[in-house]
Amino acid sequence: MAADTGFFHLRVGNEWPTFALHDVEITPDGALRLVIADPNTNTFAEHAVFRAGPYEAESAETAWYRIQVFTDLFPAGTHVQLFTLTSDSPAQSEAPYTPAADQPFAEPDWQPIPRDQLDGLVSSAAAPYLWIGGLVQSDGQSSPVLRQMRVTYGRDTYLAFLPSVYGRDEEHRDFLERILSLHESVLGDLGDRIETLPRLFDPFAAPSGMHPSWLSWLAGWLAFDLSERWTDAQARENLAKAFELYGLRGTVEGLRRYLKLYANVEARIEEPGRHATLWALGETSTLGFTTVLAPGPAEGAVVGTSATLDQSHLAAGDFGGALFDDVAHRFCVHVYCAELTEPGSLDTVRAVLEREKPAHTEYHLCVIEPRMRVGAQARVGIDAVVAQGLSPMQTGMVLGLSPLAAESVLCLAAEEP
Protein backbone atom coordinates (compact mmCIF):
# COMPACT_ATOMS: atom_id res chain seq x y z
CA MET A 1 0.00 0.00 0.00
CA ALA A 2 1.36 3.40 -1.00
CA ALA A 3 1.50 6.31 1.47
CA ASP A 4 0.61 9.89 0.58
CA THR A 5 3.98 10.63 -0.99
CA GLY A 6 6.79 8.38 -2.15
CA PHE A 7 7.72 5.78 -4.76
CA PHE A 8 8.09 2.02 -5.23
CA HIS A 9 9.65 -0.32 -7.80
CA LEU A 10 7.72 -2.90 -9.77
CA ARG A 11 10.53 -5.44 -10.05
CA VAL A 12 11.30 -7.26 -6.80
CA GLY A 13 14.45 -9.36 -7.04
CA ASN A 14 14.16 -11.28 -10.30
CA GLU A 15 10.36 -11.29 -10.23
CA TRP A 16 7.67 -8.94 -11.51
CA PRO A 17 4.70 -9.45 -9.14
CA THR A 18 1.19 -8.71 -10.48
CA PHE A 19 2.48 -8.69 -14.11
CA ALA A 20 0.48 -10.56 -16.74
CA LEU A 21 2.85 -11.23 -19.66
CA HIS A 22 1.89 -11.97 -23.27
CA ASP A 23 4.84 -12.85 -25.54
CA VAL A 24 7.11 -11.28 -22.94
CA GLU A 25 9.50 -13.35 -20.82
CA ILE A 26 11.68 -12.79 -17.78
CA THR A 27 15.38 -13.32 -18.52
CA PRO A 28 17.68 -15.20 -16.09
CA ASP A 29 18.96 -11.88 -14.74
CA GLY A 30 15.41 -10.64 -14.09
CA ALA A 31 14.79 -8.30 -17.04
CA LEU A 32 11.76 -8.26 -19.36
CA ARG A 33 12.32 -9.20 -23.00
CA LEU A 34 10.32 -10.36 -26.02
CA VAL A 35 10.04 -14.10 -26.47
CA ILE A 36 11.67 -15.78 -29.46
CA ALA A 37 8.81 -16.53 -31.87
CA ASP A 38 10.78 -18.69 -34.29
CA PRO A 39 13.73 -20.66 -32.82
CA ASN A 40 14.87 -21.69 -36.31
CA THR A 41 15.52 -18.12 -37.42
CA ASN A 42 16.02 -16.76 -33.89
CA THR A 43 13.50 -13.97 -34.49
CA PHE A 44 11.56 -12.24 -31.74
CA ALA A 45 7.84 -11.64 -31.41
CA GLU A 46 6.75 -8.47 -33.19
CA HIS A 47 3.84 -7.68 -30.85
CA ALA A 48 3.80 -8.19 -27.07
CA VAL A 49 1.71 -6.90 -24.18
CA PHE A 50 1.89 -6.77 -20.40
CA ARG A 51 -0.46 -5.49 -17.71
CA ALA A 52 0.50 -4.82 -14.08
CA GLY A 53 -1.55 -4.00 -11.03
CA PRO A 54 -3.50 -3.07 -9.18
CA TYR A 55 -1.27 -0.94 -6.95
CA GLU A 56 -3.01 0.55 -3.95
CA ALA A 57 -2.81 3.98 -2.34
CA GLU A 58 -3.87 4.85 1.18
CA SER A 59 -6.53 7.29 0.10
CA ALA A 60 -8.47 8.24 -2.96
CA GLU A 61 -6.90 11.71 -2.85
CA THR A 62 -3.42 10.30 -3.47
CA ALA A 63 -2.35 11.36 -6.96
CA TRP A 64 -0.42 8.87 -9.06
CA TYR A 65 2.30 11.05 -10.45
CA ARG A 66 5.12 9.56 -12.51
CA ILE A 67 6.35 6.32 -14.16
CA GLN A 68 10.00 5.70 -15.04
CA VAL A 69 11.36 2.78 -17.05
CA PHE A 70 15.01 1.77 -16.68
CA THR A 71 16.22 -0.05 -19.76
CA ASP A 72 19.16 -0.72 -22.03
CA LEU A 73 19.57 1.39 -25.14
CA PHE A 74 16.66 0.60 -27.45
CA PRO A 75 17.74 -1.30 -30.58
CA ALA A 76 16.60 0.11 -33.91
CA GLY A 77 13.15 -1.08 -34.91
CA THR A 78 11.84 -1.55 -31.35
CA HIS A 79 9.31 0.56 -29.45
CA VAL A 80 7.66 0.62 -26.01
CA GLN A 81 4.52 2.50 -25.01
CA LEU A 82 2.97 2.67 -21.53
CA PHE A 83 -0.65 3.20 -20.51
CA THR A 84 -2.18 4.00 -17.11
CA LEU A 85 -5.60 3.48 -15.61
CA THR A 86 -6.94 4.31 -12.14
CA SER A 87 -10.00 2.80 -10.49
CA ASP A 88 -11.90 2.63 -7.21
CA SER A 89 -11.86 -1.19 -7.15
CA PRO A 90 -9.09 -3.80 -7.43
CA ALA A 91 -11.25 -6.11 -9.56
CA GLN A 92 -9.60 -7.32 -12.75
CA SER A 93 -12.63 -6.24 -14.75
CA GLU A 94 -11.83 -2.64 -13.89
CA ALA A 95 -8.85 -2.72 -16.27
CA PRO A 96 -10.01 -4.51 -19.45
CA TYR A 97 -7.54 -5.05 -22.29
CA THR A 98 -7.20 -7.23 -25.41
CA PRO A 99 -3.67 -8.66 -25.73
CA ALA A 100 -4.08 -9.89 -29.33
CA ALA A 101 -5.51 -6.64 -30.67
CA ASP A 102 -3.40 -4.07 -32.50
CA GLN A 103 -4.49 -1.57 -29.84
CA PRO A 104 -4.78 -3.71 -26.67
CA PHE A 105 -5.52 -0.71 -24.45
CA ALA A 106 -8.18 0.93 -26.58
CA GLU A 107 -10.68 1.32 -23.71
CA PRO A 108 -11.27 5.01 -23.02
CA ASP A 109 -10.21 4.74 -19.38
CA TRP A 110 -6.66 3.89 -20.41
CA GLN A 111 -4.48 7.02 -20.65
CA PRO A 112 -1.48 6.73 -22.99
CA ILE A 113 2.03 7.98 -22.38
CA PRO A 114 3.81 9.00 -25.61
CA ARG A 115 5.58 6.10 -27.31
CA ASP A 116 9.22 5.52 -26.33
CA GLN A 117 8.91 8.05 -23.51
CA LEU A 118 10.50 6.23 -20.58
CA ASP A 119 9.83 8.94 -18.00
CA GLY A 120 6.18 9.95 -18.20
CA LEU A 121 3.48 11.59 -16.09
CA VAL A 122 0.34 9.73 -15.05
CA SER A 123 -2.58 11.67 -16.50
CA SER A 124 -5.25 9.41 -14.99
CA ALA A 125 -7.45 10.84 -12.26
CA ALA A 126 -6.58 10.34 -8.59
CA ALA A 127 -7.95 7.04 -7.31
CA PRO A 128 -7.02 4.30 -4.80
CA TYR A 129 -5.81 1.79 -7.43
CA LEU A 130 -3.41 2.10 -10.34
CA TRP A 131 -3.01 -0.22 -13.35
CA ILE A 132 -0.15 -0.09 -15.84
CA GLY A 133 -0.23 -1.44 -19.39
CA GLY A 134 2.59 -1.89 -21.84
CA LEU A 135 2.79 -2.44 -25.60
CA VAL A 136 6.12 -3.68 -26.99
CA GLN A 137 6.75 -3.70 -30.74
CA SER A 138 9.70 -5.04 -32.73
CA ASP A 139 10.78 -5.80 -36.29
CA GLY A 140 11.69 -9.29 -35.10
CA GLN A 141 15.45 -8.77 -35.32
CA SER A 142 15.98 -7.53 -31.78
CA SER A 143 14.18 -6.86 -28.51
CA PRO A 144 14.18 -4.03 -25.95
CA VAL A 145 15.25 -5.04 -22.43
CA LEU A 146 13.35 -3.52 -19.50
CA ARG A 147 15.39 -3.67 -16.29
CA GLN A 148 13.14 -1.91 -13.78
CA MET A 149 10.08 0.35 -13.45
CA ARG A 150 9.45 2.94 -10.76
CA VAL A 151 6.15 4.57 -9.79
CA THR A 152 6.10 7.90 -7.96
CA TYR A 153 2.95 9.11 -6.25
CA GLY A 154 1.77 12.13 -4.26
CA ARG A 155 2.99 14.90 -6.57
CA ASP A 156 6.16 15.54 -4.59
CA THR A 157 7.41 18.07 -7.13
CA TYR A 158 9.72 21.05 -7.24
CA LEU A 159 6.73 23.21 -6.34
CA ALA A 160 7.65 22.60 -2.71
CA PHE A 161 10.87 24.62 -3.27
CA LEU A 162 9.00 27.67 -4.66
CA PRO A 163 7.32 30.39 -2.58
CA SER A 164 3.89 29.31 -1.37
CA VAL A 165 2.20 31.95 -3.48
CA TYR A 166 2.80 29.80 -6.57
CA GLY A 167 0.73 26.96 -5.15
CA ARG A 168 -2.34 28.91 -4.04
CA ASP A 169 -4.07 28.96 -7.39
CA GLU A 170 -5.58 25.48 -7.67
CA GLU A 171 -6.63 26.13 -11.26
CA HIS A 172 -3.06 26.50 -12.47
CA ARG A 173 -1.35 24.31 -9.87
CA ASP A 174 -1.61 21.16 -11.98
CA PHE A 175 -0.14 22.87 -15.04
CA LEU A 176 2.73 24.34 -13.00
CA GLU A 177 3.59 20.98 -11.47
CA ARG A 178 3.75 19.37 -14.90
CA ILE A 179 6.04 22.12 -16.18
CA LEU A 180 8.31 21.65 -13.18
CA SER A 181 8.31 17.91 -13.80
CA LEU A 182 10.17 18.48 -17.07
CA HIS A 183 13.06 19.95 -15.10
CA GLU A 184 12.76 17.25 -12.45
CA SER A 185 13.19 14.57 -15.11
CA VAL A 186 16.52 16.11 -16.09
CA LEU A 187 17.77 17.09 -12.63
CA GLY A 188 16.25 14.24 -10.64
CA ASP A 189 19.13 11.86 -11.38
CA LEU A 190 21.56 14.46 -10.10
CA GLY A 191 19.58 14.70 -6.88
CA ASP A 192 19.67 10.94 -6.47
CA ARG A 193 23.42 10.94 -6.98
CA ILE A 194 23.87 13.61 -4.33
CA GLU A 195 21.78 11.59 -1.89
CA THR A 196 23.89 8.49 -2.49
CA LEU A 197 27.20 10.38 -2.46
CA PRO A 198 28.32 9.02 0.95
CA ARG A 199 28.38 5.45 -0.38
CA LEU A 200 31.03 6.46 -2.93
CA PHE A 201 33.45 7.07 -0.06
CA ASP A 202 32.77 3.70 1.56
CA PRO A 203 35.16 1.03 0.18
CA PHE A 204 32.60 -1.68 0.94
CA ALA A 205 29.75 0.11 -0.90
CA ALA A 206 31.47 1.97 -3.76
CA PRO A 207 30.66 0.58 -7.23
CA SER A 208 33.41 -1.37 -8.95
CA GLY A 209 31.86 -2.66 -12.17
CA MET A 210 32.39 0.53 -14.16
CA HIS A 211 35.65 1.44 -15.89
CA PRO A 212 37.61 2.96 -14.37
CA SER A 213 36.47 1.43 -11.10
CA TRP A 214 35.44 3.83 -8.36
CA LEU A 215 37.67 1.80 -6.04
CA SER A 216 40.62 2.96 -8.15
CA TRP A 217 39.59 6.57 -7.54
CA LEU A 218 39.42 5.97 -3.78
CA ALA A 219 42.81 4.26 -3.85
CA GLY A 220 44.25 7.16 -5.86
CA TRP A 221 43.11 9.70 -3.27
CA LEU A 222 44.94 7.70 -0.60
CA ALA A 223 47.98 6.96 -2.82
CA PHE A 224 47.27 3.29 -2.14
CA ASP A 225 48.14 0.84 -4.90
CA LEU A 226 45.58 -1.86 -5.74
CA SER A 227 47.19 -5.14 -6.74
CA GLU A 228 45.90 -6.85 -9.87
CA ARG A 229 46.06 -10.18 -8.03
CA TRP A 230 43.45 -9.10 -5.47
CA THR A 231 39.83 -10.10 -5.86
CA ASP A 232 37.16 -7.42 -5.57
CA ALA A 233 36.48 -8.42 -1.97
CA GLN A 234 40.20 -8.33 -1.09
CA ALA A 235 40.63 -4.92 -2.73
CA ARG A 236 37.75 -3.50 -0.66
CA GLU A 237 39.06 -4.97 2.59
CA ASN A 238 42.63 -3.80 2.02
CA LEU A 239 41.49 -0.34 0.94
CA ALA A 240 39.49 -0.04 4.16
CA LYS A 241 42.73 -0.70 6.10
CA ALA A 242 44.81 1.79 4.11
CA PHE A 243 44.50 4.60 6.67
CA GLU A 244 45.56 2.22 9.46
CA LEU A 245 48.53 1.06 7.39
CA TYR A 246 49.71 4.63 6.90
CA GLY A 247 50.10 4.89 10.66
CA LEU A 248 52.59 2.00 10.50
CA ARG A 249 54.69 3.24 7.59
CA GLY A 250 58.41 3.31 8.34
CA THR A 251 58.10 0.61 11.04
CA VAL A 252 59.03 -3.06 11.03
CA GLU A 253 55.40 -4.09 11.51
CA GLY A 254 54.23 -1.83 8.70
CA LEU A 255 56.84 -3.16 6.28
CA ARG A 256 55.95 -6.74 7.20
CA ARG A 257 52.24 -6.10 6.55
CA TYR A 258 52.90 -4.43 3.20
CA LEU A 259 54.98 -7.46 2.13
CA LYS A 260 52.13 -9.74 3.15
CA LEU A 261 49.57 -7.67 1.21
CA TYR A 262 51.41 -7.27 -2.07
CA ALA A 263 53.82 -10.25 -2.19
CA ASN A 264 51.96 -12.71 0.07
CA VAL A 265 55.09 -13.58 2.06
CA GLU A 266 55.63 -13.81 5.80
CA ALA A 267 58.85 -11.83 6.10
CA ARG A 268 61.20 -11.80 9.08
CA ILE A 269 62.90 -8.42 9.52
CA GLU A 270 66.00 -7.95 11.64
CA GLU A 271 67.83 -4.77 12.64
CA PRO A 272 71.48 -5.44 13.56
CA GLY A 273 71.77 -2.00 15.12
CA ARG A 274 69.32 -2.99 17.87
CA HIS A 275 71.82 -5.54 19.19
CA ALA A 276 74.94 -3.34 18.96
CA THR A 277 75.97 -2.23 22.46
CA LEU A 278 79.05 -0.91 24.21
CA TRP A 279 80.95 -3.48 26.22
CA ALA A 280 83.10 -3.41 29.32
CA LEU A 281 85.44 -6.36 29.87
CA GLY A 282 84.51 -8.27 32.99
CA GLU A 283 81.29 -6.31 33.54
CA THR A 284 79.02 -6.66 30.52
CA SER A 285 81.22 -8.73 28.21
CA THR A 286 83.30 -11.90 28.20
CA LEU A 287 86.58 -11.90 26.32
CA GLY A 288 86.31 -13.88 23.12
CA PHE A 289 82.52 -14.26 23.31
CA THR A 290 80.78 -10.91 23.63
CA THR A 291 83.67 -8.58 22.87
CA VAL A 292 84.07 -6.99 19.47
CA LEU A 293 86.19 -4.30 17.93
CA ALA A 294 84.71 -1.43 16.00
CA PRO A 295 85.27 -1.94 12.28
CA GLY A 296 87.69 0.33 10.54
CA PRO A 297 90.57 0.34 8.06
CA ALA A 298 94.16 -0.07 9.21
CA GLU A 299 95.59 3.40 9.64
CA GLY A 300 99.03 4.75 10.49
CA ALA A 301 101.92 2.39 11.38
CA VAL A 302 101.44 -1.37 11.05
CA VAL A 303 104.10 -3.38 12.94
CA GLY A 304 106.02 -5.65 10.62
CA THR A 305 104.84 -3.86 7.50
CA SER A 306 105.26 -0.12 7.63
CA ALA A 307 106.67 0.35 11.11
CA THR A 308 109.46 -0.90 13.37
CA LEU A 309 108.88 -1.50 17.05
CA ASP A 310 110.03 1.39 19.22
CA GLN A 311 111.12 3.30 16.12
CA SER A 312 107.79 4.40 14.60
CA HIS A 313 105.09 6.81 15.70
CA LEU A 314 101.33 6.95 14.96
CA ALA A 315 100.40 9.81 12.70
CA ALA A 316 97.62 12.10 13.77
CA GLY A 317 94.47 11.43 11.77
CA ASP A 318 90.74 11.96 11.69
CA PHE A 319 89.59 9.65 14.47
CA GLY A 320 86.32 9.49 16.36
CA GLY A 321 84.02 8.14 13.62
CA ALA A 322 80.65 6.59 14.40
CA LEU A 323 81.09 3.46 16.48
CA PHE A 324 78.31 1.43 14.87
CA ASP A 325 78.38 2.96 11.41
CA ASP A 326 78.41 -0.48 9.72
CA VAL A 327 75.04 -1.52 11.19
CA ALA A 328 73.28 1.79 11.67
CA HIS A 329 70.27 2.45 9.40
CA ARG A 330 70.43 -1.04 7.96
CA PHE A 331 68.08 -3.99 8.19
CA CYS A 332 67.80 -7.50 6.78
CA VAL A 333 64.65 -9.06 5.31
CA HIS A 334 64.33 -12.86 5.32
CA VAL A 335 61.73 -14.54 3.10
CA TYR A 336 61.26 -18.24 2.44
CA CYS A 337 61.72 -19.35 -1.14
CA ALA A 338 58.73 -21.71 -0.69
CA GLU A 339 56.45 -18.64 -0.49
CA LEU A 340 57.75 -17.15 -3.74
CA THR A 341 55.43 -19.29 -5.84
CA GLU A 342 53.93 -16.71 -8.21
CA PRO A 343 55.83 -15.33 -11.24
CA GLY A 344 57.64 -12.13 -10.34
CA SER A 345 57.16 -12.59 -6.58
CA LEU A 346 60.76 -11.73 -5.77
CA ASP A 347 60.59 -8.59 -7.92
CA THR A 348 57.41 -7.64 -6.09
CA VAL A 349 59.19 -8.05 -2.74
CA ARG A 350 62.00 -5.76 -3.89
CA ALA A 351 59.52 -3.19 -5.26
CA VAL A 352 57.65 -3.10 -1.94
CA LEU A 353 60.90 -2.71 -0.01
CA GLU A 354 62.07 0.15 -2.22
CA ARG A 355 58.73 1.89 -1.89
CA GLU A 356 58.04 1.41 1.80
CA LYS A 357 61.45 1.48 3.51
CA PRO A 358 62.51 4.69 5.28
CA ALA A 359 64.40 6.93 2.89
CA HIS A 360 67.65 6.97 4.89
CA THR A 361 67.93 3.19 5.31
CA GLU A 362 69.51 0.32 3.38
CA TYR A 363 68.27 -3.25 3.31
CA HIS A 364 69.61 -6.70 2.50
CA LEU A 365 67.16 -9.23 1.07
CA CYS A 366 67.90 -12.83 2.01
CA VAL A 367 65.94 -15.68 0.41
CA ILE A 368 65.95 -18.68 2.76
CA GLU A 369 66.44 -21.89 0.81
CA PRO A 370 66.27 -25.51 2.08
CA ARG A 371 69.85 -25.79 3.31
CA MET A 372 71.87 -25.37 6.50
CA ARG A 373 75.06 -23.33 6.52
CA VAL A 374 76.73 -23.06 9.91
CA GLY A 375 77.43 -19.45 10.70
CA ALA A 376 75.28 -18.17 7.83
CA GLN A 377 71.98 -20.03 7.83
CA ALA A 378 71.43 -22.53 10.61
CA ARG A 379 69.14 -21.03 13.28
CA VAL A 380 66.50 -23.54 14.27
CA GLY A 381 63.02 -22.17 13.68
CA ILE A 382 64.27 -19.16 11.73
CA ASP A 383 66.39 -20.01 8.70
CA ALA A 384 67.32 -23.66 9.15
CA VAL A 385 65.21 -25.44 6.53
CA VAL A 386 65.47 -29.19 6.06
CA ALA A 387 64.51 -30.44 2.61
CA GLN A 388 62.08 -33.28 2.08
CA GLY A 389 63.68 -36.72 2.23
CA LEU A 390 64.54 -38.73 -0.87
CA SER A 391 62.24 -41.45 -2.13
CA PRO A 392 63.29 -45.12 -1.56
CA MET A 393 64.25 -45.39 -5.24
CA GLN A 394 66.42 -42.29 -5.00
CA THR A 395 67.94 -43.51 -1.74
CA GLY A 396 69.26 -46.70 -3.35
CA MET A 397 70.83 -44.77 -6.18
CA VAL A 398 72.81 -42.29 -4.08
CA LEU A 399 76.26 -43.47 -2.93
CA GLY A 400 76.65 -43.71 0.82
CA LEU A 401 72.93 -43.67 1.75
CA SER A 402 72.47 -47.46 1.99
CA PRO A 403 72.99 -48.70 5.58
CA LEU A 404 75.74 -51.25 6.12
CA ALA A 405 74.78 -54.62 7.55
CA ALA A 406 76.38 -57.99 8.12
CA GLU A 407 75.29 -59.14 4.69
CA SER A 408 76.50 -56.02 2.91
CA VAL A 409 79.26 -56.62 0.35
CA LEU A 410 81.29 -53.71 -0.92
CA CYS A 411 82.98 -55.66 -3.74
CA LEU A 412 83.52 -59.28 -4.84
CA ALA A 413 86.86 -60.94 -4.06
CA ALA A 414 88.97 -61.94 -7.03
CA GLU A 415 89.11 -65.65 -7.71
CA GLU A 416 92.45 -67.30 -6.95
CA PRO A 417 94.19 -68.98 -9.91
Image (cartoon, rainbow, N blue to C red):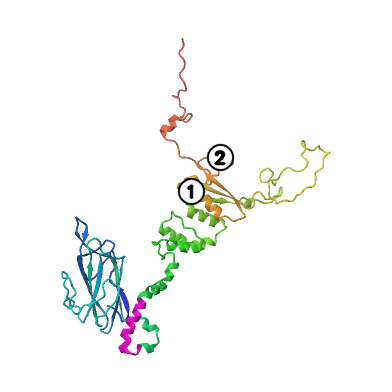
Magenta region, residue range? 167-184
- Front one among 363 and 385: 363
Q: Which residue is mark 1?
A: 345
- Front one among 287 and 36: 36
Give the secondary structure at mark 1. Answer: helix
In the rendered image of this protein, does residue 126 appear above or below residue 142? Answer: below
Number of disc labels:
2
- Front one among 9 and 70: 70
Q: Amino acid at mark 2?
A: Arg
Q: Which residue is mark 2?
A: 373
Q: Viewed as shown, does residue 284 lie left or right of 171?
A: right
Mark 2 Cα shell of 10 Å, populated few (<14), some (14-19), many (≥20): few
In the rendered image of this protein, does residue 41 appear above or below residue 107? Answer: above
Residue at (44, 32) in percent of width and height: 395
Residue at (32, 78) in percent of width and height: 6
Q: Is residue 277 visible?
A: yes
Residue 174's spot in the image, x, y percent? 31, 85
Q: Main secondary structure of the magenta part?
A: helix
- Front one among 221 and 377: 221
Give the secondary structure at mark 2. Answer: loop
Q: Residue 173 lies in magenta, yes or no?
A: yes
Residue at (45, 27) in percent of width and height: 405
Q: Residue 94 lies in magenta, yes or no?
A: no
Residue at (49, 45) in percent of width and height: 337
For marks 1 and 2, give the one nearer the viewer.
1
Residue 40's spot in the image, x, y percent? 19, 55
Calculate the distance from the C-alpha at mark 1 to the C-alpha at mark 2.
25 Å
Residue 350's spot in the image, x, y percent? 53, 50
Which quarter shows the N terminus? bottom left
